[in-house]
Amino acid sequence: MATPAGDHGLDLRLMRILDVLLDECSVSKTATILGQSQPSVSLALKRLREILGDPLLVRSGVKLIPTEKGSRSEPKSRISCVRSMRSRFPRIHSTHGAIIAVSVFTPPIAWAPSSCRASASLVRREAPNMPLDFCTIPEESRIFTELEEGKLDMVIGNWPMPRDYLRFAPLLETDIVLVMRNEHSLAGRTRIDLQEYMSLDHLSPTPHTSPAISPIDGQLAQLDAKREIAMSVSEFTLVPHMLARTDLVFTSSRPFAEQMAQSGAFSIVGAPEELARMSFYTLWHERSHLSPATSGSGNCCAGLPKR
């Protein structure tokens, strides 16, 4: 016989289902282990989500993984701490940091629009003890795994096709342009076509370009084209110094190009129309959507719907 429901409406049956669900990360396996039907376990999961105010298990590609709250407790202590999962997170006392990875292809002027600067101010006001760690994006193969495992909280990027199962919010959309020194043979042109573009020697912000996470090479890959990268730099601050002494061209967002052009030493030329526009956005995993680090960070996009 089930025990009477407590303050949260939980009974031993629901807590047992929760325990197995978080171990197996599968409704069908849980149903088999407990000798119940899949619809019955699905209804129980729905009820647990309502009671605990958390999805508990979320999709990551073709599999289910626990949310941050769902994975926080060890199997032996889940039932005893399950009520505390419902409590509101005291953000102002939080020392749980948020790790935000920023694409090497993303110039600083582009990933700090006014909305995110305001969010940083909100973090300092509502969670002054919570550190934020901005770091470069790890190897392409690790980005999505680290989001899934909670090693990264958010990613700021601008590659053409982010994973569609991640939560997504736009930051900025802008034209793509070429930057070059004033003495370059193409300086003064309004725009160049794709054939001219492919014949140029290019400066890139990374020595190991990956079409999957590069906003330029990713778009070119969709066009079945590959540009010639003659030189690369690891930091955007080096770009003006390299362009000033060579005939290389640098493809970037218009805001960064205009910042460079303010010195009077560089010209801006429109990129081929095939490259379209560059979009900057934030990605985060469903598992951490309601986590203290995400909600407490003042993330400017945490409340937006999944795309």
Image (tube, rainbow, N blue to C red):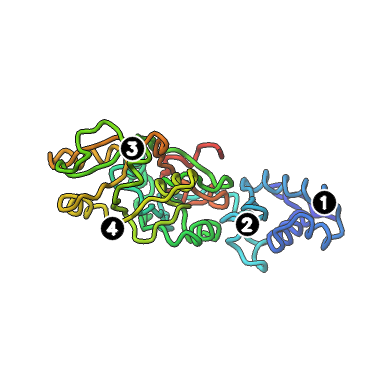
**Residue indicated by mark 4:** 231
**Coordinates of residue 53 in the picture (x, y in percent):** 62, 45
Measuring from the top left, give residue 89's x and y in whole percent: 50, 50
Q: Nearer the viewer, residue 170 or 100?
A: 170
Quadrant for residue 94, please give it. Answer: bottom left
Amino acid, disc 2: Pro
Query: Given the image, on which type of amino acid does mark 3 rest?
Result: Ala
Q: Sequence order check: which comes first, mark 2 or mark 1?
A: 1
Q: Amino acid at mark 1?
A: Gln
4 or 2: tag closer to the N-terminus: 2
The answer to whether 97 is drawn above or below residue 190 in the figure is below
Visible in this render: residue 121? no
Give coordinates of residue 117: x percent, y percent. Answer: 32, 41
Mark 1 crowdedness (10 Å alpha carbons): few <14, some 14-19, many ≥20? some
Q: Residue at x 65, y 62 (%)?
A: 78
Residue under pointer 1: 38
Between 41 and 104, the residue placed more toward the observer is 104
- Name which of mark 4 and mark 3 comes first in the sequence: 4
**Mark number for residue 66?**
2
User: For the image shown, how many numbered marks are present on the structure?
Assistant: 4
Q: Residues within 10 Å of mark 2 (few under 14, many from 20)?
A: many
The amino acid marked with disc number 4 is Met
Tag 3 near tag 2, CB within 8 Å: no
Instruction: Give me the residue at 62% from left, 57% from top.
Output: 66
Q: How far is disc 4 from disc 1 in space, using C-alphas?
A: 57 Å
